[in-house]
Image (spheres, rainbow, N blue to C red):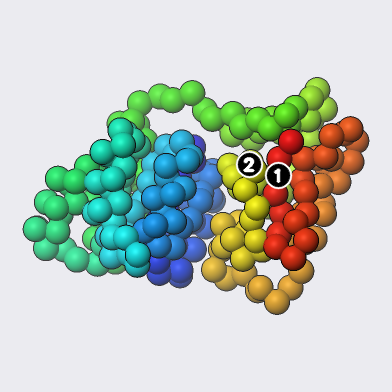
Amino acid sequence: MLILIVEDERKIASFIKKGLEAEGYTVDVAFDGEEGLRVAQINDYDLILLDIMLPKLDGVTLCGHLREEGKETPILMLTARDAISERVLGLDNGADDYLTKPFAFDELLARVRALLRRGGPKVPPKLQVADLILDSSTQEVRRGERPIQLTSLEYRLLTYLMHNTGRVLNRALIEEHVWGSSFDSFTNTVDVYISKLRKKIDQEANKKLIHTVRGIGYVLKE
């Protein structure tokens, strides 16, 4: 299951992300409303956790845009406000459920499970670029007929690259989405993991898929 968190408080986003990943979910994070809308429009998420008070574009407006575009992804609103009017506003704009901060993670997890059940069974997303296939239902990766064994971090990195096929990603974006806000940006960890992933993905293949864009970052493309 693929979940998007749109939350500008990085500690909260990191806490939720780590907790959900520990439960076996794949998680993307956006830290403002405009970025949240963009990634929600291009990716097929199973659930969106959406804060109401966001910079650039508030959560209620973001939710309304997604519903106007026909996106039926379940949306759980998160907010520090507990006024009835705020709950009504969010629900009227297409949210499926509402959770007031601060909350216990167990309650959040229960609501996540309930919304995913309500959304009904879905065909697990299978990502493919050329002959590289990532099956998120089994967390199996293969290049043609060759199975590829990845660590959990390598798998998350590859998932993020494949969700953004053809898009040049700078190191800051990769850090935020794969490692979270606790990442030490003064290390070369991103480059090290890209190198490890490239060896496993491209070393035995005629066509290279992971490319370096000098001075900017990395891109996965045919």
The residue that disc 1 covers is 220
Quadrant in which the C terminus appears? top right
Judging from the image, what secondary structure is the residue with disc 1 in? Answer: strand
Q: Is residue 23 above or below residue 183?
A: above
Q: Name which residue lies at 79% across and 35% down.
A: 148
The residue that disc 2 covers is 165
* Viewer can see residue 140: no
Q: Is residue 212 left or right of residue 16?
A: right
Q: Residues within 10 Å of mark 1 (few under 14, many from 20)?
A: many
Q: Is residue 125 left or right of residue 72?
A: right
Q: Amino acid at mark 2?
A: Thr
Q: Position of residue 179 (x, y in %)?
A: 61, 61
Q: Is residue 83 above or below residue 139?
A: below
Q: CA distance from mark 1 to mark 2?
A: 5 Å
Q: Position of residue 209 (x, y in %)?
A: 77, 40
* Between 13 and 109, the one nearer to me in the picture: 13
Dot 1 or dot 2, earlier in sequence: 2
Q: Is residue 59 left or right of residue 20?
A: left
Q: Quadrant for residue 3, please give it.
A: top left
Q: Is residue 19 left or right of residue 218?
A: left
Q: Name which residue lies at 66% across and 73% down.
A: 185
Q: Quadrant for residue 217, please give it.
A: bottom right
Q: Name which residue lies at 70% across and 77% down.
A: 186
Q: Residues within 10 Å of mark 2 (few under 14, many from 20)?
A: some
Mark 1–mark 2 contact, CB under 8 Å?
yes
